[in-house]
Image (cartoon, helix red, strand yellow):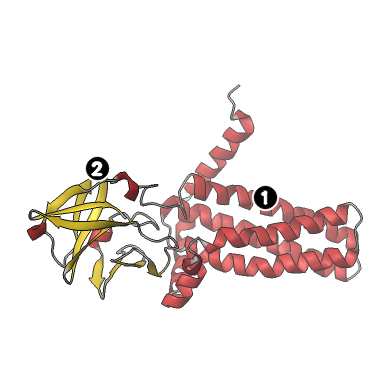
Amino acid sequence: MSVQGRSGALANRIVKRVEAMKALDGIADAVAGVVQRVTAPDELKSLLSGTFLGHALHPVLTDLPVGFWTSAVLLDIVGGDDDAVDVLLAAGNVSALATAATGLADWSDSYGPPRRAGLVHAALNGGALLAFSTALAVRRAGARRTGTGIALAGSAFATLSAYLGGDLVYHRGLGVDHSGFESDSAVGTWTDAAADTEVSATPRRVVVKDVPIMLVRDGDEVRALVATCVHAGGPLDEGQVADGMVTCPWHGSRFSLKDGSVSRGPAALPQPALQTRRRKGRIEVRSA
């Protein structure tokens, strides 16, 4: 038998079937559209994306409801204090709302198979929240053993959802750096990129040592950013340049031409920037 085993192969087949369910597209697209409209303001989109943190916010928050809920179930099983269990359940339910908001903001920028899988991921999380909320209400009404059973069902929903969420990140690459790991450091020494006369205020895409780079003239300076957007791989060289910023044409992330810092999400990571210099009528670049 392979190292993966039958259970792993089965899980992968189930995920593939979920991703292939085109019947989910209508619901997924409608929900994503609503989320995109609600999160359209720059400040809100950046907040939910984790731009201020320099790291996607959703995976940071997921530990809270999972931790609270798991602690509540374990404490309940070993015979811990009932009031403590209730507090943990309540904390998990409240933190799940903030976690869901950040997850929806991230998911709304996905398409195709990841959007379908993300919808099911959200539905499973919704089932977990409903189960744990019901468990808390039942426990407070005096039926604590019944509440324990419902909470265990909530744990099952949360576990299935976590598996699907992991697949979205590690298989589909949602939330990871799409510019290429260490792509900027691949150009470690000054390397020819283009003729000075070829660079204008309109972004130009060149490839240097297999790294796609966007060159653009910003006043008297020539700026260079890795051309593949860190958020989802969009072509920055096709984006709009204004006020020292470039806006990704795919999801609207906005980066400083000078240093790649983010001024608007959904990108949370800075865009890799390179140094530039003029030499004998040519533009050379190297890692910043």
- Vertical order, 283 against 248 (above or below): above
Q: Residue lying farthest top?
A: 1
At horizontal 7% and vertical 60% (from top left) the residue drawn is: 197
> Can you tell which of label 2 and label 1 is closer to the viewer?
2
Label 1 amino acid? Thr
Label 2 amino acid? Lys
In the rendered structure, the answer to whether residue 262 lies left or right of residue 237 reads: right
Q: Secondary structure at mark 1?
A: helix
Instruction: Give x and y (percent) for residue 115.
Output: 47, 56
| Closest to the observer, 157 or 274 | 274
At horizontal 71% and vertical 64% (from top left) the residue drawn is: 130
At horizontal 89% and vertical 52% (from top left) the residue drawn is: 78
Instruction: Give x and y (percent) for residue 10.
Output: 59, 35
Image quadrant holding the C terminus, namely: bottom left
Q: Is residue 23 visible?
A: no
Label 2: how many residues lie within 10 Å, few (<14), some (14-19) or many (20+)?
A: some
Instruction: Give x and y (percent) for residue 227.
Output: 28, 55
Could you tell me how far apart the alpha carbons at marks 2 and 1 are, in whole angstroms?
43 Å
At horizontal 71% and vertical 67% (from top left) the residue drawn is: 93
Q: Secondary structure at mark 2?
A: loop
Q: Quadrant of residue 7?
A: top right
Residue annotated with mark 2: 209
Label 1: how many residues lie within 10 Å, few (<14), some (14-19) or many (20+)?
A: some
Instruction: Give x and y (percent) for residue 169.
Output: 51, 50
Q: Quadrant of residue 61?
A: bottom right
Residue annotated with mark 1: 159
Q: Earlier in the sequence, mark 2 or mark 1?
A: 1
